[in-house]
Amino acid sequence: MTVIAEAETWPEAVQKVMECRPDVALMDLRMPGMSAIDGVAILHKECAGVGIVLLSAFDADEEVYGAIRAGAQGFMLKDCTRDELRECIRSVQEGKTWLARGPAAKLAARVHTPELTQRQIQILTLVTEGKTNKEVGALLNVTEGTVKVHVNHIFGKLGVGSRTAAITRALQRGIVLLSKTASARGPALEESYHATNPISPAVVSPRNITKEVRTSQVKSELNPKN
């Protein structure tokens, strides 16, 4: 395997992939700049022949589900072994879909889970930020009673019975991202979600390519000697 380029943000990664046209693009799901779903969708449309593998410290089912729907062929957790990562990359390069066991189970369960509407996600995000029903109603220009109805529907779809449980489930599933709520929820929550050290995103090719941009950290993670 040969690393031919590296990026730090989704817009930069998309540009590098479009320029280099690698066999496989290995991406950190939560890179800044745009959502992973948007980034994957662009690459799937503009670089249909490039396999896309996403890495994440968390297997939030909403993110796995959205990324696969957008066109990603692989999803691995960052605590995977080098052999597992190598096998995933090679499988995707061969046109197969590869999911780690945990995310695969979550994806299967997610397919049968009711979808939240965009309005419900908007309300859930505000609730996660600590807003009351009255405050949510004022921000969205709807009545407090309307917000309460939406909240009850959210409880039903998430299978919970309280606001605290709904917030917890939303964060676990990736419906609401921590970046939007960490400041309101405090540093302890942020630490629990970011305890795993990230792997640098990279554009890689399982075949030998003359044009190379090598980085020691990524080379170490992917072990491209094989």
Image (spheres, helix red, strand yellow):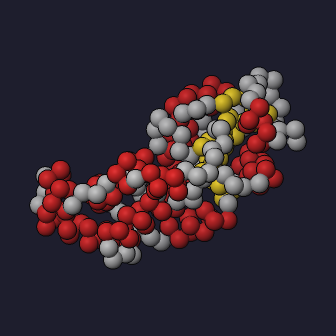
| Residue closest to the eye, 47 or 192 | 192
Q: Establish if 53 lies above or below 207.
A: below
Q: Position of residue 182 (x, y in %)?
A: 41, 50
Residue 191: x, y in percent?
A: 52, 52
- Residue at coordinates 63% horizontally, 46% vertically from top-left? 197
- Report if residue 107 is visible in the image: yes
Instruction: From this view, report whether residue 166 is shown above or below residue 220.
Output: below
Quadrant location, the N terminus: top right
Residue located 26% across and 72% down the image:
152
Q: Nearer the viewer, residue 201 or 209?
A: 201
Q: Is residue 129 left or right of residue 32?
A: left
Q: Tell me: 165 left or right of 194.
A: left
Spot occupied by residue 125 in the image (x, y as percentages of width and height): 32, 55
> Is residue 206 or residue 142 the one in the foreground?
142
For this orientation, the residue located farthest to the right is: 226
In the image, farthest residue toward the top: 211
Spot occupied by residue 101 in the image (x, y as percentages of width and height): 67, 65
